[in-house]
Amino acid sequence: MLKEKIIFNLLYKWKYLLAFLKAKSLPKTKLKKTETITYVAREADKDWIFGAKVTRLAKFSKLNAQTYFHDRLRDLPDSDGYFFVFHQYFYRAIRHNPKILTKKNIVMFTHPNWTFSFSKTHVIWCLNKADYVICLNSEVKRELIDLGLKAEKAILMPIASDPNFFYPHERTTGSVGFCSAFGDRKNPEMVYNLIKHMPERQFYMIGRYWDRYEKYEELKKLSNFTYFDNEDYERYPDLYNKIDIFISPSTLEGGPVPVLEAMLSNCFPIASKTGFCPDIISHGENGFLFDIDAHYTEVIDLINQADSKTIDVRSTAMKHSWENCSKKLDQLFLS
């Protein structure tokens, strides 16, 4: 940690201190309340999940809210408050827009990814300059506080989805599904073993890049497997309604958002204990949870148990709507 502090002080901290000096020279204005909010993301985020987040949150805000997209995060418009959809955007914005240091700032933190440039020392120092840090799950909140984030700044808020877009269905077929892009942390071996060892079940995969998986050729030959490759997002509600039991086997997540989408579609979720899954799933009630290093046979047992569950899963996820999330952020900006 000492080495981190030395590197941060020598290479990065001075850039922020210059911004703080510039902020002090700005005219002081007495702000009675927050009336305008700018939701900030990069231009490259417009057609991705970050772009969708800021657009929907701004849409449901009862304050005067707008979105701002800029890849270099320069020239932020004047606003009483700013919401940064990714924590590193806030750090860059401080350096290029010292004026934001005189306003209210809320920063979203999905999951840690410590690097040389963004070490624990660097990140925690910057996050403590924000008014609030939105933590998508309890694990991240605990970790940031343990590392030095002021506890009163850490707000637990699982990210939202749209109950008007995802509609419910009755679970009748026992079909199983996944939704993710291919990657090591998505636990592809678990996916493969579940499909291979449950030939009596129909499995659906919604996602992309699974052709990069080393066992993809073997996987696609399995008669109980259907792959919806890089489908338009507008089709997702219909695709989720082919699925009765939704599996999220990831080893590391900030969300994952598909779990919430599936729950709004009344799929019964079975998820690894990562991200916000332990925050929105009550084991044995509206879903099942398993350890990230669980053997696939444990998940097979949970899938078979899920057949007897009749709970209205959608009703347990309705509180995690974009509208409710936006209302909570409005309250934080006004507090």
Image (cartoon, rainbow, N blue to C red):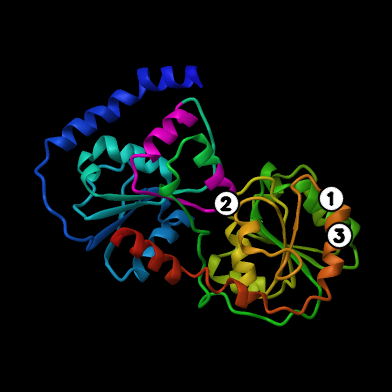
Residues at marks 2 and 1 touching, judged by CB atoms closer than 8 Å: no
Is-magenta flag for residue 130?
Answer: yes
Q: Quadrant of the C terminus?
A: bottom left
Question: Which residue position holds label 1?
Answer: 218
Question: Which residue position holds label 3?
Answer: 300
Kind of residue sitting beneath label 2: Ser
Neighbour class for label 1 at 10 Å: few (<14), some, many (≥20)? few
CA distance for labels 3 and 2: 27 Å
The answer to which of marks 2 and 1 sits earlier in the sequence is 2
Neighbour class for label 2 at 10 Å: few (<14), some, many (≥20)? some
Question: Which residue position holds label 2?
Answer: 138
Q: Residue at x 57, y 51 (%)?
A: 138
The magenta-colored residue range is: 117-142
Measured as percent of width and height from the top left, residue 113 is found at: 54, 37
| Quarter of the figure with residue 231 | bottom right
Frontmost residue, 155 versus 60: 155
Frontmost residue, 180 versus 330: 330
